[in-house]
């Protein structure tokens, strides 16, 4: 199911491109904000939760997910180089699964790790806030990677669509419109975080059982469908 | 011995028919797929390579369906026309990755790089390669598993004459070894030099099939059209129409010229100057009016 050569090519493609810079900029920004907040406001559980929930989980994780998820396959389909993977006796679902693992790993490293560090800077993990949000970031990394990998497989405008989803749906609607929150990876992952954190430190609009079911369902369905799409991917010529 | 069989295959994109009811068998040796740009050559190659499903009909490799069948790639090597190829890797890294995906390793990759004579630049990034070098590394990536079928889409595009000769030599050798080599081109001379067998595709249809002599004859024997201006068009027309090498002559009054359709190319080219000299007529313009590749090919469709 996992092909080390596909993984190596995907890592190099992801981290070697210019847009990989965003992978470093966003976490750096989070750490700067965390440090500044701690300096000016001191250690405060509620503020820590607001910063991690409002910036790390609502904005940074989905953006990193878009870059890693769509970047793991989109550019290869765009420039046609995916043909070198497809013209091999390698199962197409194996290619998708491997790219998913790579996207998840990159998203976790660049979103969950900085979230943990920022949490420690903000309030030293008081009320388990840092750990809770880190777990939310880890969980969200999986679902976002699967979703955006699928998007990268089916659309040539995957990054734009991904950004719209991440910024408009997750960040804007997810925080303003209550109904939209049920269908939001962010809220599902917060439901998991809620379980870990001290009372009231983290809140989610979705119950843990439902959130777990939806997270697993979305990840599995998106991965399966991406594998199917890749099997039938048409590399139409220039004609 | 591996054979690709295309059986009453059509492929359309929306309302556009790219390949129209084509049947052909591609066997061992070098086959040239000849046709003007946009004739459907790439669509056909994409179907043979398993990257496109036929809308109707069947494309098979030794009886096995190619579409949605990854196992055919153990036998098929593909050299795509598009340039995208992991530019951030070195040539060697790229070929090694291709070998690994075939379940092979560094030894096979080294051999393939030696076959295309790219060892000298194998440690440079692909992004620094010239078009000919990229083409050769693509070849190496397709050769790592010594496939019995090699499909190449416009492999000579952008190559200089020396690289072209090297690649032709390599393909000839592979054909002689009993591999099934198919390449597409829109240049007759290219195909003629290399292919023992030629398939001609025009406007999505299978126009002709045979060895290069047969195709060449079809192309030179077709009716040729000429635009001729002379000191006495009508006298010239009268003298020419008496000969069986011309099928029709029109006096174009607005252009002040003759439009002549010749059916016997060799005889007509000898007849025209002789008749003019005998009649004391001066030829002012003699120009072929349908020498474009498309018109040559479209004649073949009717043949």
Image (spheres, coloured by chain):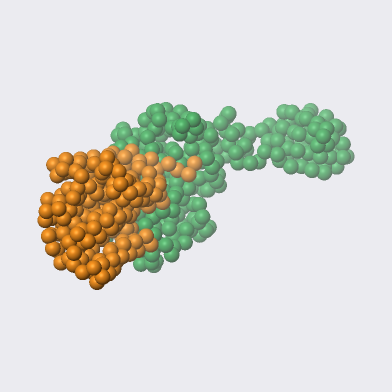
Quarter in which the C terminus of chain B is drawn: top right
Residue A137: image quadrant is bottom left
Q: Position of residue A15 (x, y in %)?
A: 31, 61
The residue at 78%/30% (across/down) is B250
The residue at 55%/46% (across/down) is B187
Of the pair B122 and A95, the residue shown nearer to us: A95
Q: Residue furthest bottom?
A: A39
Quarter in which the N terminus of chain B is drawn: top left
Of the pair A15 and B85, the residue shown nearer to us: A15
Q: Position of residue B109 (x, y in %)?
A: 30, 58
Whether residue A222 can be seen here? no
The residue at 79%/43% (across/down) is B285
- Left or right, B257 with respect to A237, comes to right
- Left or right, A166 with respect to A202, comes to right
Q: Position of residue A146 (x, y in %)?
A: 26, 47
Q: Is residue B35 above or below residue B117?
A: above
User: Drawn colour of chain B?
Assistant: green
Q: Position of residue A64 (x, y in %)?
A: 30, 56
The residue at 19%/59% (across/down) is A46
Residue A122: image quadrant is bottom left
The total number of labels drawn is: 0
Of the pair B110 and A39, the residue shown nearer to us: A39
Which chain did the image draw in orange? A
Whether residue B86 can be seen here? yes
Of the pair B115 and B18, the residue shown nearer to us: B18
């Amino acid at each position: 199911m996992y092909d080390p050569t596909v993984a190596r090519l995907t890592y190099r493609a992801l981290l070697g491109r210019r847009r990989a810079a965003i992978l470093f900029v966003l976490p750096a920004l989070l750490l700067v904000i965390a440090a500044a907040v701690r300096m000016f406001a001191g250690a405060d559980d509620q503020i820590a939760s607001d910063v991690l929930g409002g910036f790390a989980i609502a904005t940074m994780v989905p953006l990193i997910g878009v870059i890693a998820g769509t970047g793991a396959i989109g550019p290869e389909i765009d420039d046609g180089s995916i043909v070198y993977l497809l013209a091999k006796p390698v199962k197409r679902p194996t290619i998708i699964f491997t790219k998913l693992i790579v996207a998840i790993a990159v998203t976790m490293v660049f979103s969950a790790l900085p979230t943990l560090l920022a949490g420690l800077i903000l309030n030293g993990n008081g009320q388990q806030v840092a750990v809770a949000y880190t777990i939310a970031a880890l969980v969200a990394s999986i679902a976002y990677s699967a979703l955006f990998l699928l998007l990268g497989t089916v659309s040539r405008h995957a990054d734009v669509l991904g950004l719209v989803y991440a910024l408009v749906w997750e960040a804007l609607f997810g925080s303003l419109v209550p109904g939209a929150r049920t269908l939001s990876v962010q809220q599902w992952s917060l439901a998991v975080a809620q379980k870990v954190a001290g009372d009231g430190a983290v809140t989610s609009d979705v119950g843990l059982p439902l959130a777990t079911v939806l997270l697993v369902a979305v990840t599995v369905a998106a991965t399966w469908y991406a594998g199917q799409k890749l099997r039938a991917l048409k590399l139409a010529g220039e004609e | 011995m591996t054979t690709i069989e295309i059986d009453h295959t059509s492929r359309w994109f929306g309302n556009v028919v790219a390949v129209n009811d084509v049947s052909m068998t591609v066997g061992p040796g070098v086959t040239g797929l000849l046709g003007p740009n946009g004739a459907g050559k790439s669509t056909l190659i994409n179907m043979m390579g398993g990257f496109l499903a036929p809308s109707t009909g069947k494309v098979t490799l030794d009886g096995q369906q190619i579409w949605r069948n990854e196992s055919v790639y153990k036998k098929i090597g593909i050299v795509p026309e598009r340039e995208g190829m992991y530019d951030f890797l070195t040539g060697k890294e790229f070929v090694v990755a291709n070998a690994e995906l075939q379940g092979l390793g560094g030894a096979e990759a080294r051999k393939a790089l030696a076959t295309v004579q790219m060892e000298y630049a194998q440690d440079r990034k692909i992004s620094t390669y010239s078009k000919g070098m990229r083409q050769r590394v693509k070849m190496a990536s397709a050769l790592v598993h010594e496939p019995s079928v090699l499909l190449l889409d416009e492999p000579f595009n952008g190559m200089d004459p020396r690289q072209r000769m090297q690649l032709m030599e390599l393909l000839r050798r592979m054909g002689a070894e009993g591999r099934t080599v198919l390449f597409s081109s829109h240049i007759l001379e290219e195909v003629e030099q290399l292919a023992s067998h030629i398939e001609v595709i025009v406007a999505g249809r299978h126009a002709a099939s045979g060895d290069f002599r047969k195709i060449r004859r079809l192309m030179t024997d077709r009716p040729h059209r000429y635009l001729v201006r002379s000191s006495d068009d009508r006298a010239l027309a009268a003298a020419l129409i008496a000969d069986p090498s011309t099928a029709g002559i029109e006096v174009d009054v607005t252009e002040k010229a003759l439009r002549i359709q010749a059916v016997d190319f060799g005889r007509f080219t000898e007849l025209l100057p002789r008749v003019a000299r005998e009649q004391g007529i001066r030829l002012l313009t003699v120009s072929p009016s349908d020498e474009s590749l498309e018109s040559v090919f479209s004649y073949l469709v009717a043949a």
